[in-house]
Image: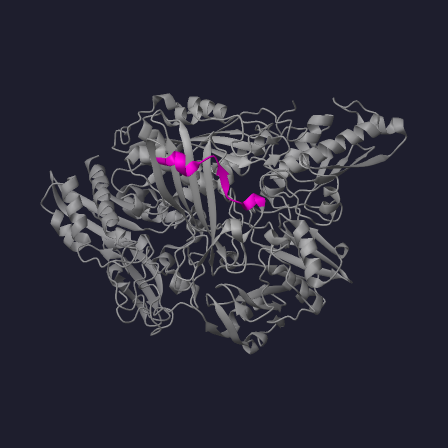
Amino acid sequence: MTPPLARVDAHGKVTGTVHYGADRVPPGLAHAALAVATIGRGRILRIDTATARAVPGVRLVLTHLDPGELTAAGYLMAGGYALQSLQPLLDDHVAYRGQPIALVVADTLLAAAEAAALVRAEYEAEPVSAELDSGGADTLEQAAAIPLPMFADVNVGDADGVFADCPVQVDAVFDCPPQHPVPMELIGCVAEWDGDTLTVHEGTQNAAAVRHGLAAQLGIDAAQVRVISPYVGGAFGNKNSLQPHTSLAAVAARRLGRPVKLVLPRAQMFHGASFRPASRHRIRIGATRGGQLRAAIHEADQQTSRHDLFPASYTAMTSRLYGIPNFRGRQRLVRTDVQTPGFMRAPYEHPAAFAFECAIDEVAYATGQDPVDLRLSNDTAADPVTGQPFSSRHLAECLRRGADRFGWAKRAAEPGSMTAADGTLIGWGVAAGAYPASAAPAIARLRADARGKLTIHVGGHEMGQGIRTAITQTITGDLGVPAGSITVDVGDTRVVPQHVTAGSWGTATALPAVHAALLELRRQLTLPETGPADLRAALSTAGRDDIEVEAATRAPGQPAEIIDYLRGGGFAPAGPEYPGFTAFSFVAHFIEVRVEPTTRRIRVSRVVSIADCGRVASPVTAASQIRGAVVWGIGATLHERSEVDPRYGGFLNADLAEYVVPVNADVPDIDVGFIGIPDPQLNALGVKGLGEVAMVGVAPAIVNAVFHATGRRHRSLPIRLEDNL
Amino acid sequence: MSDVAEDPVLLRDYPALAESLAKAASQQLRTMATVGGNLLQRTRCAYFRAGAPFACNKREPGSGCAARGGLDRGHAVLGISESCIATYPGDWAVALLAFDGLVDVAGPAGERTLPVADLHREPGDTPQIEHALTPGELIVRIRIPVTVIGRASTYHKIRDRESYGFALASAAVGLAMDGDTIGNARIALGGVATRPWRARGAEQSLIGGPITTETARRAGQIAFADARIGRDNGYKVELGIRTVTDALLIAAQRGAR
């Protein structure tokens, strides 16, 4: 085992030498800014751009494009490429407040922003339905609205019948607010034409969708579109599709014959990109008096837009968290007047775990069981939904190890029974989490030369999760070559295809391809399959200056043709159900909160998180992933809510001062541990996803700790000061 | 701001003033910000800041107030009017108000001095007029009377996170003990009013009595006796009372040292 590498790009990031997509400043660059709709729904009657055009330096104002110049790219979750089906500037329809109605391009950013603010529109406004409970919001049964097996209701056994007969019943409703991912790097792009070839620099998790989506929108061949996304300054799902404005920048660049940069200001990030939709969960759990879970019913309502069905998938996790023999899951979609919501870190699993794991805590108290013991006694080795085994499942060990490190045995069960000398209430909470272990096909191309340099091009995106470090760690561990000799190229469509990096499948997708390329390199150089390799000597023996090999890998059960589909820009993740097994990552969180006696401020004071993500590919960045996810969980539980004024629609607290995320002072030391047992069924390296499962269960662990401290059950997030007075 | 917040004399003689600066902004902002500029920090009311489509009498006199009946969780419960409920967001001015701070102002007509108490205005029918400075005037100096009451003082700030957040309720308080009874008390409130808010009735209620949880809480209740609540900000009354209670007890502890 080679020693854990520090983040390979840390120095570059800290010193500012790393360049993000919109950092690029090509000669002749023009700057674009969007004017956006101020009504929540309706129609544009008239747009006055005269004042905007009169601003010195303004070169172009676009308000309406015809299909000959631009078409919609289609919704990502319906076979297309984009955040949503609605492409702004194609018609006069306004679907949500903040929808772009004009693009202004000028010689300077200042002129573009000034002019965009001067675009005036007259509207015919219609009533807005912006929230789950708004009149006019339409509720659809998902199973009928999206007739695909993966989004169907879950029905195992007779959940309703068995629940009715259970002596212990918990029945509670939990609410999660809309939230925004607010990555530090704003969403933006630089679009440049060289003849008929378009190059886009953009911080994206999905260079493939940007490439193939733009080609479709502009009516050109995908071979004429190159997308370069070497670094992404945080994504969390916000950058996993073609953004609605990227094509506008491309059109403007083509019209002007100049490169165009468009970066969304922070307020527009709240309306011009995806968000975590509001959701509501009714959880019913039936148990024996001894704490054996017999039945569970999870019914979820989730917000979507008028124009798209963002699917709900909350019950896929809750039906697998324990060995509950009778389970019914039903999901509904509520159409509201917003941009299409999307995937935000642990998109379904965080809200689902909040609801389900808080309900499990209620079962523990109702049965007099210790919350850890209750979870351990309801563990399962087989997937209750399919009946097939889990490829690996070490949740019980996560719980046992976490309890030990946290000192759980010293916990007094009674709420309000642990206090500090100054009257501060202390609460200890626990929760478990799971997340599908998905994977996608990938191609890796590896080049080695006689000077000892290695360059790897692979499908994947560096969003700060540390994919470069994990790849470097894999290569240096395999060949025994120094990390400094390895160059990792990701997020670039020019060499190998780029599949969207999301859903915690990035590592389990890229690393097997890298590993396969290493094996191919060894084969071609007639080196043994494992052990340190002297590449220079091997190249010399072979009489070569350099060597380039390529390998393609796919998820278990995927057909060989999936590689061609990948090359064509297809969306091709697999899991969590594979032929013969089901694969999930698991986690357990133990959290201490302290509640002030008078003003009742809640502070998270201690966290122990133990994860089962298979083999840990990069210990340093993996631990960092967990810490970041716990911070996300703290924010989601105690701080973050995208505020909606139902009279207007849109989001009101659309900046980093008012959209409250945790600061350093809100975050305690986070003790991180890994089980570290490889999952060889999923891939040759035995790695499972981590970035999302790490957040799952943080919220209920905090909420359960608050109950333990105060005796008060909170069923709506975030818990704010006024909720705890 | 950071220079003043770290001043050893201020830390010793007026911890409330130093704390109000330290809690007013992140380290980076404190390093760049000035103590004069901070006094006139404008409201965080989202309806004021966001522009169209929201009506705002402060931004566009006569247009109405979208905050009334809207998302008013952060809005004021003291000093509000029909035309405006926007909260004064600052901390430093609240602490200065508690201790009778003065500002020296220079303008085309020369220099003048006005109490911090006269610097900010309640919105009334003219929320667009926020302060008593005339065009062309600059704050050039801030003066604070030296008084023993500053030593047993604190600025207690309750917000949605531990740092980089505006007050939901805050209290600048000082106590001068005369044996076991309170000889003098200062209480000013932040985060709950349309301007820095001096609670003189609450101060008076304490004088001549002991400092206990009960007397402290009663002072808090008096401070909020005239509160008028809206849709989501009713909690500010109870939170504010508790903030005053805790602040007084912290100040009393400092006085006892």
- At x 58% / y 36%, what residue is drawn? A576
* In this picture, residue A257 sits left or right of residue A188: right
Residues A469 and A632: in front is A632
* In this picture, residue A34 sits left or right of residue A635: right
Q: Is residue A587 above or below residue B79?
A: above
Could you tell me if residue A667 is visible in this image?
no
Q: Is residue A677 magenta?
A: no
Q: How many badges with numbers are in the image? A: 0
- At x 70% / y 63%, what residue is drawn? A218
Q: Which residues are magenta?
A: A149-164
Q: Quadrant of residue B175?
A: top left
Q: Position of residue A27 (x, y in %)?
A: 71, 61
Q: Is residue B10 above or below residue A426?
A: below
Q: Is residue A66 above or below residue A500?
A: below
- At x 17% / y 50%, what residue is drawn? B221
Q: Position of residue A173 (x, y in %)?
A: 37, 44
Residues A680 and A529: in front is A680
Q: Position of residue B86 (x, y in %)?
A: 32, 61
Could you tell me if residue A326 is visible in this image?
yes
Q: Is residue B211 above or below residue B225?
A: above
Q: Position of residue A104 (x, y in %)?
A: 59, 68
Q: Quadrant of residue A400?
A: top left
Residues A196 and A12: in front is A196
Q: Is residue A160 magenta?
A: yes
On-image quarter of the N terminus of chain A: top right
Residues B12 and A195: in front is A195
| Display colour scheme | one colour
